[in-house]
Amino acid sequence: MGSSAITAITIGLCLVLVAVYFASDSYRVMQNVIITTGLSENSYVKSALNFLKPDEKDQGSSVARDDLNKPKKSQQLLLSPEELKSYDGGPDSKGLYLAILGEIFDVEKGAQHYRPGGGYSFFVGRDAARAYITGDFSETGLIDDVSDLDSASLASLEDWLSFYKEEYKPVGKVVGKYYDFNGQPTELLLSIREKMNVGKGNKWAEDKNKEIFPPCNSEWSKERGSKVWCSKKSGGIDREWVGVPRELHIQGKDPRCVCVKNYGPPSTDPNSNQHNNNGDLDYPLLKEYPNCPPASESCTVSHP
Ligand code: HEM
């Protein structure tokens, strides 16, 4: 390349640099810095470049220091049980937080219940999952240990968890029993969740069972003895059919009076075209009441 070409390129580059330099606010800022710091323009540019370059040491420390307690999309708030205590709404409190099974919720919205003096203030600043089930609001009862609760109780606890998820903002996790230092569920939490699912499944089956075989109405009097009968609402189950009383015998449970749909297809196969048009009456664990006509909606089961 000839010397005139090199000169032309150099001049061109200089012109571009000068244009950028003067066109932006950076000129004024740079002048200011040069004046106040005494840095040469060259060292200013170097410092600016250093500033823009991600510095692992600085980045790490500033994020850790400033944002440790701020929940972020990617970085959730992780508190020890001890740290959670400082979110109890007291004089130097950092907020109004409570936890269930290690999941922290901001309950500021419900401050009327949770602030000091509120009816449920004992729930904040801690994980008192157990007390949601036992109703034991003493200091010994307000604890996070639920390992000995049965699956039905754990299913109820899940209802509380769902309530908080719906009503309040989840803000993080308590590190320890239910979440590890990375905010991941512990083995204990996973096993509790499994038990919870069993409880939910059983409850679903029970509810379903109650829908198919709702309890009978019953009454007892000295004069007439005891009577069971069916209606469109018995055992708290509203339905379109009345049914007939039968005794349901489930192994391991006391026999009980249930109302059984006595027309249409069986509930286990509601779309069937081939059925006896006697509803669920063919279910094998049902027994007729003695001396009661099979189609009667009412049976006297014991005489005075
Ligand atoms: C295991 C027993 C119980 C537990 C764990 C419990 C728990 C709670 C909690 C956590 C709240 C606040 C809900 C929110 O954030 O909005 C609440 C509200 C309330 N509870 Fe209970 N409770 C229990 C039993 C009772 C009983 C037996 C009664 C009544 C005699 C009752 C009456 C109320 C009332 C009136 C409210 C306020 C509802 C509102 O203003 O929206 N609770 N309960």
Image (cartoon, rainbow, N blue to C red):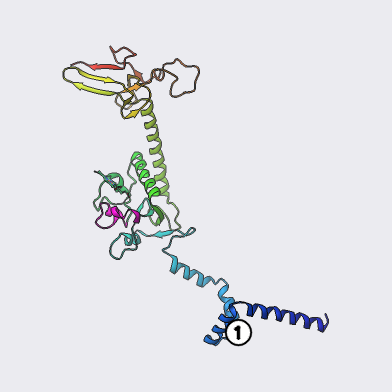
Q: Amino acid at mark 1?
A: Glu
- Depth check, front residue: 271 or 23: 23
Q: Residue at x 37, y 44 (%)?
A: 158
Is residue 15 covered in magenta? no
In the displayed structure, would residue 12 be above or below residue 151? below
Query: Which residue in the structure is indicated by mark 1?
Result: 41
25 relative position to 205: left or right: right
Q: Quadrant of the N terminus?
A: bottom right
Q: Position of residue 25 (x, y in %)?
A: 58, 77
Task: Check disc 1 and report its element: helix, strand or loop.
Answer: helix
| Closer to us: 82 or 238 | 238
Q: Residue at x 39, y 30 (%)?
A: 208
Examine the image and state in which quarter residue 224 appears: top left
Q: Which residues are magenta?
A: 107-125
Give residue 173's quadrant in the image. bottom left
Percent from the top left, x then y, of residue 2?
83, 82
* Residue at the (25%, 17%) spot, across then down: 301
Does 168 sit above or below residue 252? Answer: below
Classify residue 71 as left or right of residue 146: right
Along the line of sight, the residue nearer the viewer: 129 or 195:
129
x then y, percent, for residue 276: 45, 15
Query: For the C terminus, which image quadrant?
Result: top left
Image check: 7 left or right of 56?
A: right
